[in-house]
Image: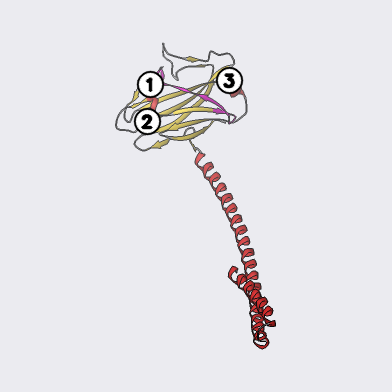
Amino acid sequence: MKVKTAGLWMAAALLAVSVAGCSSGNSSSAGENTEKLKTEISKLQEENKQLKEENDKLKQEASAAAVAATGNTEAADSTNEGGSTNTSGSEEQDKAIVKGQPLTIGGIAEYTITKTSFAKKVIPSKPGSFYTYYEAKEPGTTYLAITLKVKNLGGEGKAADSFAEMQVKYDNQYEYKTFSTLEKNGGEDFTYTNISDVEPLKNGTLVYLAEVPDEVQTGDKPLYAEVKIEGQTYRYTIR
């Protein structure tokens, strides 16, 4: 479009020179040249007009395309964000472990939660003449005890404290850590899990204890335990 515009100005300049030269040159020849130049200028003006119209149309199309592209990008971002949220929610969803229903992991162990109870003092299931017990010392607290029976399905002895880890959560926000103990002599006494093994194809009774406020026992808010087994977290719903 710049070339055409320059040509238009040159034609106009030549026309002016030709008109100025009419007074001293051949009037007939000058007149013919003038008409030719007028025709050329007219053509150039028409072409310039068409180019301007085409240029304006291209600008409008480019602007519309840019707006459409921006809208598509925003829609895609919104879709991706929604998809990420859903995926995150799915990944964070814990599997369930239910009291009385064995959870079996091939080659590792079988896990069964058999009992859940609150008590100020926790004793073995079949206390002998001499036994260890656990008592909540802090005023206004009690123990939440979760009994987990395990069967070692591995080929060698497995440390009692490596079968599972537990954390109690109350009202979906208050977290309480647990520690474990292992029944021995058929439930007559407790022993430490960190110094005990469960031999292959044998059973062990683990008790996980969390010292919690009395409100956790008497309240009606949600209460569950997160049970971590072999890197996977399972949710045990208490209420």
Which numbered disc, 3 or 2, marks the residue closer to the eye?
3
Q: Residues within 10 Å of mark 1 (few under 14, many from 20)?
A: few
- On the image, numbered disc 1 is attached to which residue? 194
Describe residue 99's horizontal placement relative to residue 69 as left or right. left
Which numbered disc, 1 or 2, marks the residue closer to the eye?
1
Judge by depth and name the residue closer to the eye, 100 or 166: 166
What is the quadrant of residue 3 in the picture? bottom right
Judge by depth and name the residue closer to the eye, 37 or 81: 37
Residue that sits furthest to the right in the current view? 23
What is the quadrant of residue 149 in the picture? top left
- On the image, numbered disc 3 is attached to which residue? 213
Q: Position of residue 19 (x, y in %)?
A: 68, 79
CB atoms of marks 1 and 2 within 8 Å: no
Q: Is residue 27 magenta?
A: no
Q: Position of residue 154 (x, y in %)?
A: 32, 33
Q: Is residue 7 visible?
A: yes
Give the magenta range: 169-195
The colour style of the image is: secondary structure
Q: Earlier in the sequence, mark 1 or mark 2?
A: 2
Describe residue 25's horizontal placement relative to residue 156 as left or right. right
CB atoms of marks 3 and 1 within 8 Å: no
Residue that sits furthest to the bottom in the current view? 28
Q: Residues within 10 Å of mark 2 (few under 14, many from 20)?
A: many
Give the spatial CA distance, label 3 vs label 1: 27 Å
Residue that sits furthest to the left in the current view? 155
